[in-house]
Amino acid sequence: MTTIIGIGIENRKEIAAKVQEILTEFGCDIKTRLGLNDYKETECSYKGLILLDVPNREQAVLLENKLKEISSVIIKEMEF
């Protein structure tokens, strides 16, 4: 079984570094990472979406809990 974690970021410019720090901490537990942003030619996007494939359920829960401590982060999850 694998867990897909969707991370919605509402205030990307202010919290991206905090999110990246946590993702780096769990880097060995993340099988796949896909980052999507609301592309604009003239400026950096305010919102972002990151999809993670985390095969280890226990590590996925720990990762989610750390991310939930950051305001402006929305977590959604799917299991396969």
Image (cartoon, rainbow, N blue to C red):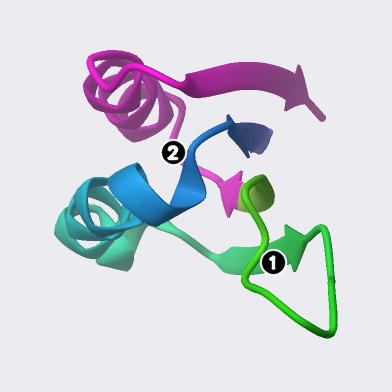
In the image as oriented, which residue stretches furthest toward the front? 42
Crowding near the residue tagged with mark 1, few <14, some 14–19, many ≥20 C-alpha atoms within 10 Å: few
Instruction: First in sequence, mark 1 or 2: give its number.
Output: 1
Q: Percent x, y for residue 57?
A: 46, 26
Q: Percent x, y for residue 1?
A: 68, 33
Label 2 element class: loop
Residue drawn at the location 62% of the way across and 49% of the way down: 46
The residue tagged 1 is 34
Give the vertical position of 17 relative to 74 (above or below): below
Q: How far apart are the two marked residues, 1 and 2, measured between alpha carbons?
A: 18 Å
Give the vertical position of 8 relative to 50 (above or below): above
Tell me: 78 left or right of 76.
right
Type of amino acid at the residue the image marks with label 2: Asn
Residue drawn at the location 41% of the way across and 55% of the way down: 13
Tell me: 58 left or right of 76.
left
Pair 1/2: label in front: 1
Between 79 and 73, the one lying in front of the other is: 73
Quadrant in which the C terminus appears: top right
Quick check: is 18 in the magenta stretch? no
Crowding near the residue tagged with mark 2, few <14, some 14–19, many ≥20 C-alpha atoms within 10 Å: some
Residue drawn at the location 67% of the way across and 65% of the way down: 35
Q: Percent x, y for residue 77?
A: 68, 20
Q: What stretch is highlighted in magenta?
A: 53-80
The residue tagged 2 is 56
